[in-house]
């Protein structure tokens, strides 16, 4: 994969509550004020009880509406990105796929959910092939432009086009991190891109699986 020049910059979003998660673009990366975690045994930022990222209802590549409750009983990991992303997105999905494999049978209780920030270029066929390249069980969601604006507000996700040499060669700067939900569908963690790698993510997911109520 081509090396990408990473620079840092602060991105101010509308309202104080919007500037809270680590932001990164696939060409550039930046930091915003992140939530201050209390004492936690997790590697990721503990956002248990957050009043955002609680609702996700978007169409998948077959046009079927999917929501978080569809994945109850699993630890769901939600990541926002796009298929033309040169580094952040494929690295994140590859790490999650590695975590699933490392968990053995428990890997079936982990659900990767990829939400495209680029429905203009990311066709259903492209999204299906993209996520399947990492794990056949991953789900890709493709919001309409209006749905994308709404879900970005709900999840406090930043995204912005960065022009390329041609109109269709743009990239996206975007929030680079994964929201992690427990088996009851409650948002619990925000895992920053590059913070600990696959092992740290696996440790956190194991803890959430261990906390699951007995069947």
Image: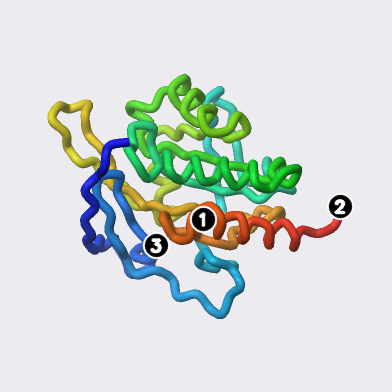
Q: Are marks 2 and 3 in contact (CB under 8 Å)?
A: no
Which residue is disc 1 drawn over? 53
- Marks 3 and 1 sit apart, C-alpha to C-alpha, by 12 Å
Numbered tag placed on residue 188 in the rendering: none
Q: Dot 1 lies on which element?
A: loop
Q: Nearer the viewer, residue 53 or 3?
A: 3
Does residue 10 lie above or below 115 as drawn?
below
Q: What is the crowding at mark 2: few (fewer than 14 residues within 10 Å), some, or many (at least 20)?
A: few
Query: What secondary structure is found at the residue carrying circle 2?
Result: loop
Q: Residue at x 66, y 53 (%)?
A: 185
Q: Earlier in the sequence, mark 1 or mark 2?
A: 1
Q: Classify mark 3: residues with Cα within 10 Å, few (<14), some (14-19) or many (20+).
A: many
Q: Position of residue 201 (x, y in %)?
A: 56, 56
Which residue is labeled 3 in the image? 21
Please tell me how crowded label 1 is: few (under 14), some (14-19), or many (20+) other residues with Cα within 10 Å. many
Disc 3 is placed on an element classified as loop
Q: Residue at x 66, y 45 (%)?
A: 110
């Amino acid at each position: 994969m081509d090396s990408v020049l990473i620079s840092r910059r602060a991105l101010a979003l509308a309202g104080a509550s919007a500037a809270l998660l680590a932001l990164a673009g696939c060409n550039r990366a930046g930091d915003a004020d992140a939530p201050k975690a209390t004492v936690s045994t997790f590697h990721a930022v503990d956002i248990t009880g957050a009043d955002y990222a609680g609702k996700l209802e978007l169409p998948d590549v077959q046009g079927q509406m999917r929501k978080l409750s569809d994945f109850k009983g699993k630890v769901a990991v939600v990541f926002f990105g796009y298929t033309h992303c040169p580094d952040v997105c494929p690295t994140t999905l590859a790490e999650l796929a590695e975590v699933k494999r490392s968990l053995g049978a428990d890997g079936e209780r982990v659900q990767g959910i990829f939400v495209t920030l680029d429905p203009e270029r990311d066709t259903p066929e492209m999204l299906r092939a993209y996520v399947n390249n990492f794990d056949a069980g991953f789900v890709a969601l493709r919001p309409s432009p209006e749905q994308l604006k709404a879900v970005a507000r709900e999840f406090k996700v930043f995204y912005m086009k960065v022009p390329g040499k041609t109109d269709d060669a743009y990239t996206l700067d975007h929030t680079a991190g994964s929201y992690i939900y427990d088996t009851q569908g409650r948002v619990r963690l925000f895992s920053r891109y590059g913070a600990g790698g696959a092992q740290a993510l696996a440790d956190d997911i194991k803890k959430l699986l261990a906390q699951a109520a007995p069947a």
